[in-house]
Image (cartoon, rainbow, N blue to C red):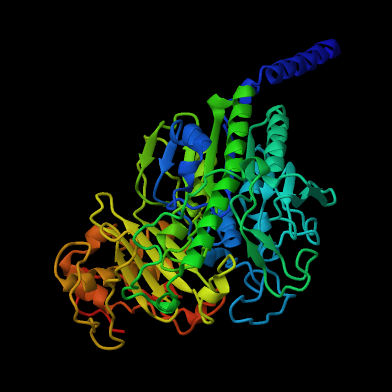
Amino acid sequence: MVVYKALAVLGGILLSLACRAEGKRPKENAQKPNIIMIMTDDQDLLMNSVQYQPAVLKQFRDEGTFFERHYCTIAQCCPSRVSLLTGKAAHNTNVTDIRAPYGMYESLQSKEKVDRSSPGGYSKFVQQGLNDQWLPLWFQQNGYNTAYVGKLMNEHSTTNYDNPYPRGFNSTDFLIDPGTYIYYNATMQSNHDPPRSLPGQYSTDVVASRAMEMMTDAASSGSPFFLTVAPIGPHTETLFPRSFQAPEATFPIFNPPVPADRHKDLHPGVQVPRGTNFNPAVMNNTSSYFKNLPLWNQTVIDYYDQFYRLRLQALAAVDDLVTNITSKVEELKLLDNTYIIYTSDNGYHIGQHRLPAGKTCAIEEDINVPFFIRGPNIAKNVTVNHPTSHTDIAPTLFHLAGIPLRDDFDGIPMPVHESQTAKLEHVNVEFWGSNLGEGNFALSLLSSTNNNTYKALRLISDDYTFNVLYVVWCTNERELYDMNVDSGQNNNIAVNFTTSGQNRMLSGETARNPIGKDHNDVLSMQSRLDALLMVLKTCKGDVCVHPWKVMFPDGSVSSLKDAMDHKYDQFFTSIPKIDFAGCAQGYIRALEGPGQDLGNVPAYDPNHAHMFYDS
């Protein structure tokens, strides 16, 4: 019996070794797919950066599915990454900025001083308990070998990298502050080892090399693996204040990205795309600090054209990374059982609406980001055009791995397989704080009081009858854009609500509206959008997925098209409108007016439709 058991064990070992030599996993693990997620940093979609990446086009557009209406729900690095890795909107993680106490740094524009002992970035992530509630740990608990290489989030640094160590990983090699964004002298930290500097080595190439090593190790482990690869390209080369890089600086210095030497001559003469919203001569009915942004002169235009070229050049190394990783998957014979995703944490703008380089704004350039997926049963060379978001990624990965969905996810699985039918028409977008411009002219272009706090709703119906962006600023200014005819967000058609009595429009000008009728229907639709955003701005879990149920528990309304029925006019008129009590640098619910408690949003009662209370 002892001899029999020994032979059985030896046979199992030999079988495992044979499977590894052939680049295959043992049969019992074959049903669990591998997942590789490549996440760039600040990559635009609408300034056409992907068109300069032949490897991405070949390996993802041609070999997979492109979600062209994929949105981040907060357009800044750290908060967006936390939302992506937890499946929760920023108002549910409360990691809302890169500055203390909501993130990391002082306000760049107002020079507001903050208590630097307050946690921000990674420390805020830990403080909120999210180190125990996020993707790598969940996947590890479900039998996955988990690995991460590259940037995790802001303020993950040489002082706190192991206090506490990010949970849920079998293997890591992080880019960490203050050397995260130094292209030719990054600081990296592997597993629990001390940090190391990499002088003379190009950051993206190091990340690519380590990713392939991790992939090889994970593939030989006998377990399915989940690998995240996060290069910094095309982020600016950022120097941190009070560090060895910028010891005299008070605020971060955002220099243009640095390409690999082999790519520094690419794309001569290429310019920022000159869309209708690039440095417009006239700013039509814009809101908040946007209306005070100055027209660019030629010196500024030339500088930011070069800035744009450097971003494209930095992305060339990311394209090499894509080639290396997909080739390694093929070499390891894993293509038939591996999903590979390509996305970015947030989008980017340069010159749109006269803005200096940067992100954080409720404009399509900042929130509409690349998202491609390829793998088993994923349609090739297919484009999906209904909206999805970063809060849908965690549920999507659970779906692919066969893990039961969590009730606290704020999104749903994306329809990555053609057999899936569940989809949403809305994306909730939010931001708190100031707009930090980047590059040499940012300070001179942005106003000194540029609070960028807003709640926004992006909604696209199946047939594009409705394709709108609705924004409510902390100043209570409103913006509404018909994206079918105004994709550059140049013509704000929002109307004003009264503050008492029956809500009526105050402005009498005429405007085209997304349903092609009279001006009163703009007000009618805007009332619906405001009510929907009232629910979404504090939603959790299923309410984020099915917000109309709050107002219509019987399920009679599940879309904006349903809600536009005129029998609901009085009901939507009666609902309190979003009304900020002030602008803040972070998520302070008391300042965000009605709707911070969903009990303020009434449910429709068809038997008493005339009795809804009036705000």
Residue 536 seen in the figure? yes
State the residue lying farthest toward the bottom: 500
What is the quadrant of the C terminus in the image?
bottom left
Residue 573, x across and y down, in percent: 25, 77
Residue 286, x across and y down, in percent: 36, 74
Image-quadrant location for residue 218? top right
Residue 14, x across and y down, in percent: 76, 15
Image-quadrant location for residue 140? top right
Residue 154 seen in the figure? no
Q: Residue at x 59, y 67 (%)?
A: 440
Q: Which of 345 and 295 is in front in this view?
A: 295
Q: How many marks?
A: 0
Residue 464, x across and y down, in percent: 26, 52
Residue 8's place in the image compared with 396, above or below, is above
Q: Which of 181 and 167 is in front in this view?
A: 181
Q: Residue at x 78, y 67 (%)?
A: 243
State the residue lying farthest toward the left: 518
Q: Nearer the viewer, residue 213 or 537?
A: 213
Residue 247's place in the image compared with 157, above or below, is below
Is residue 425 shown left or right of residue 398? left
Residue 232's place in the image compared with 317, above or below, is below
Is residue 508 shown left or right of residue 39? left
Q: Which residue is drawn at 83% across and 12% down?
A: 1
